[in-house]
Amino acid sequence: MTAENAAPVSRGRVTITEIARQAGVSVPTVSRVVNGRSDVSPSTRARVEDLLRLHGYRKRPATSPARASLLDLVFNDLDSPWAVEIIRGVEEVAHAAGVGTVVSAIHGRSGDAREWMRNLRSRASDGVILVTSALEPTLHEQLRILGVPLVVVDPMGSPAADTPTIGAANWAGGLAATEHLLALGHRRIGLIAGPPRLLCSRARFDGYRAALEAAGLGVDETLVVPGDFHPESGFTGCTALLDLPEPPTAVFAASDQMALGAIEALRRRGLRTPEDMSVVGFDDLPEVRWSAPPLTTVRQPLADMGKLAVRTVLSLARGERPDSPRVELGTELVVRSSTAPPRTAS
């Protein structure tokens, strides 16, 4: 018996997963077409409907109310106001689209990541937004097999070429922060760096280096201390810089929280910001405009990054592709009261 004349016993048994594979779209996209939802592009809908008709697919009778659409928002850690700003942007766009959000933290542990993947399968999310986190290659492959679209915000490394990423202009931000201090007359400028495994940290350091080199100054490695974006490392890093035989007159901290830790280190030494040392941060978290003194910082559009991530992952779920797989949103120097010319400036 030829396939053309085969008995229709198998018709209707094809799975949504198989339809999605043949159509080259995600499982949630096929589910949307089956359920008559409007948030699917016309070309994708036509392709899926053709396959549904070809296979004689019949929707199963509903046994429970339809599940609300869901997105998974996954962080490495949630112990930072930085994460709150990302969540705020994600929630705003997701709520307007009628999409629920499940927020998780995997803490860089493979066991937590695998547990999250098991939970994701059970709740059938429409997409995943991964923030400054890394998944094992096997888990990335499982997402691909499940047909769940993925968008990465502030990638730790270089994700797969077909994975859209959203970040900020970190190099330009590091450049602007250092140029601001140079313009004030500072020549010994310390850096409290972020974790080197993160692309954003390396880009901010490269911007710092570029500004110094453009001013005819090389990077003095003794003025570069490690940090982890948390206040404690800013405190420790600034303390180490103050203990140098010739401390810097200004510090660029690669996050606002580290900048606040640096200001506290100065205070405990009986020193003042910016009279004894200027401090610049990075992020422009809401609280830094109320710090003492209000912090000069580089604003990165954290909430906007979250908003764009939702729009991107929802378009992927509709079977659409982004115009560009790599997006960097602009940063902006915000000058407040934590920076001033050095006392030694002529």
Image: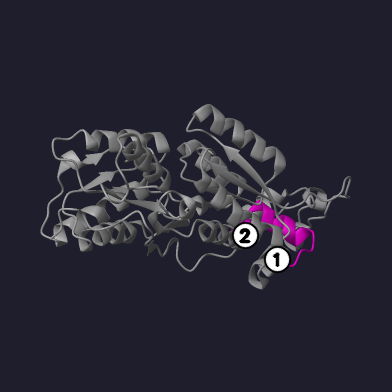
Q: Can residue 195 be seen in this snapshot?
A: no
* Closer to the camera in the image, 179 or 71: 179
* Closer to the camera in the image, 141 or 127: 127
Asked if labels 2 and 1 touch by Cβ distance under 8 angstroms, the answer is yes
Report whether 221 appears left or right of 132.
Answer: left
Instruction: Tell me which corner region of the image, top left, top right, bottom left or bottom right, holds residue 297.
Output: bottom left
* Label 1 neighbour load within 10 Å: few <14, some 14-19, many 20+: some
Check disc 1 and give the amino acid type: Asp
Q: Is residue 119 magenta?
A: no
Q: Tell me the quadrant of the picture where the C terminus can be found.
A: bottom left
Q: Is residue 237 shown above or below 214?
A: above
Q: Is residue 77 shown above or below 166?
A: above
Furthest residue in direction bottom, as rendered: 42
* Closer to the camera in the image, 53 or 91: 91
Q: Position of residue 184 (x, y in %)?
A: 22, 61
Report whether 285 appears left or right of 192.
Answer: right
Q: Is residue 129 shown above or below 320?
A: above
Q: Position of residue 100 (x, y in %)?
A: 71, 51
Q: Which residues are magenta?
A: 22-38
Q: Is residue 33 magenta?
A: yes
The residue located at (59%, 46%) in the rendering is: 73
**Circle on res. 314:** 2
Q: Is residue 175 shown above or below 111?
A: below
Report whether 173 appears left or right of 26.
Answer: left
* Closer to the camera in the image, 256 or 104: 256
**Circle on res. 39:** 1
Q: Can residue 333 be seen in this snapshot?
A: yes
Report whether 21 appears left or right of 296.
Answer: right
